[in-house]
Image (spheres, grey):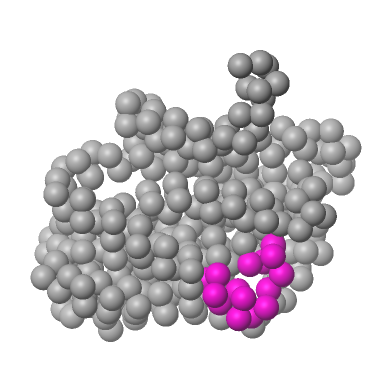
């Protein structure tokens, strides 16, 4: 093959190949993931992605989305109330004899949206990043109040559920809000630099997605392996549930008549769920009675991380010409 042919192949299939490589490396060298988590390297990389967002986003766009009270309210309610209720009744109807699967799927569905990957993948899709950021912040703050209510109503015998409010808000501030604010402050003095390095900044965002996949695989592989045959049930269940959530959020976006960029943001980010809060709630509430309930949370997290990279690419290809021309 000629060099031009190789360039064409990499342009079309480079990122999907990177996804496969990141997952394979995560399985092959999980100790590297442990090292990265021990020294917060993944957190730093994610904060860097939000710094890039701050450097490149218009402040007026952020303010506009903050004023979209109706849209954000509907999306957050859909994510934190409708989706867990649907997950509980669907999984319970299909697998009533697998309480760990029912609890795990309900728990991950009740969790707020992801702090990192949803926004990064929205940017990859050329979606509405300001809307994604607002969904992230509002959804995570609201989630600490809705999770106890939703889980106590749905899962019989649930003990008092406590969500770490201070830790959740501190994490949002350090990983999302502070880097975003710094980027906004530096936007004007670094405007020329950002224009010159837009391509590199875009590649960095894609690199962050690959690190998220690598981190998810290295952190999950041992637990999934230890769960044995239960994992074989949890993976297809996670795939089906996440596919349903993507379809529902896409339908909601069309019902609300959102533009293509906002449709991408709502579809991708509102379907993603954070594993961190799910793990904390499982550890304090369900670990003793349902130790395997964390496995569906992990398999859903892995599923959304990998599947949504391809969903983002599909949205990107379908963006209007003027939006698709943006770096």
Question: Which residue is found at the position 71% from the left and 69% from the top?
Answer: 259
Q: In this view, does 98 lie to the left or right of 201?
A: left
Q: Does the magenta stretch include residue 250?
A: yes
Region of the chain picked out in magenta, as a range: 249-263
Q: Does the magenta stretch include residue 268?
A: no
Nearer to the camera, 164 or 205:
205
* 20, above or below 188, in the image: above
Question: Which residue is found at the position 35% from the left and 57% from the top?
Answer: 239
Nearer to the camera, 167 or 189:
189
Q: In this view, does 259 lie to the left or right of 217?
A: right
Prevalent SS, magenta region? helix
How far from the left and from the top, in percent, is residue 204?
A: 64, 36
Question: Which residue is found at the position 74% from the left and 64% from the top?
Answer: 62
The answer to whether residue 135 is seen in the rendering is no
Q: How many marks?
A: 0
* 55, above or below 289, in the image: above
Nearer to the camera, 281 or 125:
125
How far from the left and from the top, in percent, is residue 219?
A: 33, 40
**Quarter of the picture holding the N terminus:** top right
How far from the left and from the top, in percent, is residue 161?
A: 28, 72
């Amino acid at each position: 093959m000629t060099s031009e042919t190789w360039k064409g192949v990499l342009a079309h299939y480079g990122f999907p190949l990177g996804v496969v490589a990141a997952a394979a490396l995560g399985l092959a060298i999980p100790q590297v993931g442990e090292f990265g988590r021990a020294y917060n390297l993944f957190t730093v990389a994610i904060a860097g992605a939000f710094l890039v967002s701050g450097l490149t986003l218009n402040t007026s766009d952020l303010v506009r989305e903050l004023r979209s009270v109706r849209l954000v309210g509907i999306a957050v309610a859909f994510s934190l109330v409708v989706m867990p209720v649907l997950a509980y009744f669907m999984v319970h109807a299909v697998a009533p004899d697998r309480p760990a699967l029912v609890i795990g799927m309900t728990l991950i569905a009740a969790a707020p949206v992801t702090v990192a990957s949803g926004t990064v993948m929205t940017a990859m899709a050329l979606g509405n990043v300001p809307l994604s950021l607002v969904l992230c912040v509002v959804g995570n703050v609201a989630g600490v109040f809705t999770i106890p209510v939703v889980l106590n109503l749905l899962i019989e015998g649930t003990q008092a559920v406590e969500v770490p409010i201070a830790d959740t808000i501190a994490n949002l501030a350090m990983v999302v809000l502070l880097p975003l604010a710094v980027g906004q402050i530096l936007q004007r003095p670094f405007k020329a630099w950002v224009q010159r390095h837009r391509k590199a900044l875009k590649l960095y965002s894609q690199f962050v997605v690959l690190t998220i996949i690598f981190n998810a695989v290295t952190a999950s592989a041992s637990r999934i392996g230890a769960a044995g045959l239960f994992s074989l049930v949890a993976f297809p269940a996670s795939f089906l549930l996440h596919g349903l959530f993507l379809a529902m959020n896409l339908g909601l976006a069309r019902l609300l008549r959102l533009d293509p960029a906002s449709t991408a943001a709502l579809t991708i980010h509102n379907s993603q769920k954070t594993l961190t809060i799910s793990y904390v709630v499982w550890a304090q509430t369900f670990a003793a009675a349902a130790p395997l309930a964390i496995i569906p949370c992990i398999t859903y997290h892995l599923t959304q991380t990998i599947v949504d990279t391809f969903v983002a690419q599909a949205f990107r290809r379908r963006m209007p010409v003027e939006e698709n021309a943006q770096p």
